[in-house]
Amino acid sequence: VSGDVAALLATTRVCVVGGSGGVGKTTASAAIAAGMAARGRKVAVVTIDPARRLATALGLDELGNEPHRIDARRFAEHGLPLGDGELWAMTLDPKRTFDELIARLSPDAETRERILGNRVYRELSDAVAGSQEFTAVAKLHELAQAGDWDLLVLDTPPSRNALDFLDAPDRLRAFFEGRALQTLLRGGGAGLRLLGRGTGIVLGLLRRVTGAELLSDLSEFFRLLGGLLGGFRTRAAEVEALLRAPDTTFLLVTSPEREPIDEAIYFQRRLRTARMTLCGAVVNRMHVDELGGGDDALDDLDARLARAAGLSRALAASVAAAFADEHALARRDAANVARLRERLGAGVPLVCVPLLDEDVHDVEGLVRLGARLFAHAP
Amino acid sequence: MPGLADKRLVFVTGKGGVGKSTVALALGIAAARRGLRTIVAELSGQARAAETFGVAPPSGEEVRLGDCLHAISVDMERAMEEYLHQRVGRVGDLLAGSRAFHAFAHATPGMRELLSIGKVWELAQDRRRVPGAQPYDLVIVDAPATGHALGALRAPATFADIARVGPIAHQGRTIDATLRDAAQTAVVAVSLAEEMPVTETLVLRARLRDALDRELAAVVVNACLPERIGPRQTRTLAAALDGADDRVVHAALRAALSEQARARAQREQLARLADGLGGSGAAAGPADEIPSLELPYLFVERLDASAVGALADRLEALL
């Protein structure tokens, strides 16, 4: 068990916390934000879907879709004084963030109202896989622009594929560039040149496949979005620049099982291709035992337990069975982490957090988790 | 028990990381053992079922894993091409090859979900639309995590509403009717005995009622730790830990106590889940209760085909 998140984030202004579903990203994000606040920074954490008890513990139940300041006493009473630091937090409301984005990019009030009232937008925009991902990135960008914080921590949406949100800007672009279709649907030379040959036939077929009404609703929808395209392009470029900025880093969270580790390794490759920086990885919920997974002298453990600890034979057998299983998991986890370390390379520090006996879903739990993420007390 | 073997479509969903793919595959193995021609359909772009059996099929292709057991990783592009071919024949191939159409399909919100759900519906038809394809008795859908899965389940009705008339409206209504029909379709939630997954399972149940007017067919609680040590024994061990100087004995006592603490926390969450699933208060009868089934934590290095087969033994109870 090693590593220190404070060292990883020493010069970071934006930290994107990524990893596959169910590895503890949300709690890790909150614990990291609180820990950095305790080190004197003004920190905002954007969470996606915190456990209700955690949200209540942080006072995140209130609506607003904007960060609000967490009462420092909540942490002080559990032994983590924030001092001069500040902790702000919010839970992302994807639909509302989307509406806000449309409002901000609309050239005029009429366009805004017509998009927000459009049936395709209303019924479908929140059903799209990836809408959480791109609204999360949009919110991050907005907060970074505001410049009110020393550090922003973004907890990425729960998805099986940890990389979904990396594709978010592209998907959003596809969404807005439906304008190309709108040109097509109105006919005209520009559309034909843009979309290639056979367009007239395509349009006729499209009508046969979708039905005329859906086609006209979609066409209206894409036409309206077309008015936002200029603003959106600028914004997409800014978002990409933000994600590649020298003081923006990604922090991976993984559990020590095989699949999340495979995904973490893949994630690093994708980040490298996208020219984004990985500052480190947190291996959460590691099985560790006091033998460090290295000792095989477990023969006769029953007898040793009975002798040294005075346990009954039956109880000694239960303890020995539990230990044999847990010890095997500790060895498995150690081997998986060794593989991760080797594949990520020496330049990517790992912070290993042991499996805690209790779920983390309150401030006390965050402080306990924080003590494992940070090497030194603030 | 819910009689999943009598359905045509079983959706397996739950929070990220709870083991949906493993449970979906294990259910598929259990059904295939009964002689049902079964396919496990993955919607996440992965091919975990095939990988577990050491097969690497091309995306979107049906592949045989064993007697009566098949798998497919549903591919949106491929599903779209198939749909177009059915609707407008050879000219559909022209459409599928056109940039304009691809732009349209990718830009249209919800289209991905609609096409995926349309494909699993197609797999479950007696008369397959794909030329030469054989029908399946049972399609087990390894669905996305809760929120996205609900989005996918609602997509056909939403599109039908927007389109009102025309082929998509018609197709959307047909698929939606299948999803709402308890005789044909079941939704199984996978959970862990932990705070967040239990909460998400209860939320899924409520939202499924709202969205499709459907009840969960069953809840599978994955990775339940054994209860090896009782409360009195726990006190004995805690006392023994204080006086233990043998390094190995100390480590063993600590590990056993730690496992016991986690097992106890799991029992609390299982009780919370049972409470939440036990119908709506005192008026609820046994008919309102949703069956739940615990799967044991497997202390194995990796979940290979034989480990998943062991889980299938337990899941047979749900068929």
Image (spheres, grey):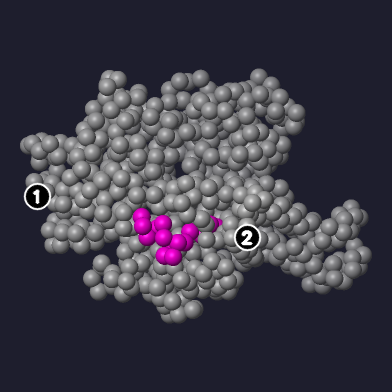
In this picture, is B150 found above or below B228? above
The residue drawn where x is 87% and y is 56% is B235
Q: Is residue B204 left or right of residue B243?
A: left
Q: Is residue A102 left or right of residue A219?
A: right
Please state which amino acid type lies under the numbered disc 2. Answer: Pro
Q: Can you say which quadrant of the picture contains the C terminus of chain A?
A: top right
Most foreground residue, B259 or A56: A56
Residue B15 x, y percent position in the rendering: 53, 51
Q: Residues within 10 Å of mark 2 (few under 14, many from 20)?
A: few
The residue drawn where x is 60% and y is 23% is A69
The residue drawn where x is 64% and y is 39% is A53
Q: Is residue B60 left or right of residue B237?
A: left
Residue B65 x, y percent position in the rendering: 42, 74
Chain that bears disc 2: B
Residue A374 x, y percent position in the rendering: 66, 37
Residue B125 x, y percent position in the rendering: 32, 68
Region rendered in magenta = B176-190
Most foreground residue, B210 or A59: B210
Please state which amino acid type lies under the numbered disc 1. Answer: Ile
Residue A240 falls inside the magenta stretch: no
Where is residue B239, by image quadrant?
bottom right
Query: Does the image show residue A217?
Result: yes
In this picture, is B208 found above or below B82? above
Decide: marks 2, 1 in contact (CB < 8 A)? Answer: no
Residue B186 falls inside the magenta stretch: yes
Q: Which residue is mark 1?
A: A201
Element type at marker 2? helix
Q: Which residue is mark 2?
A: B286
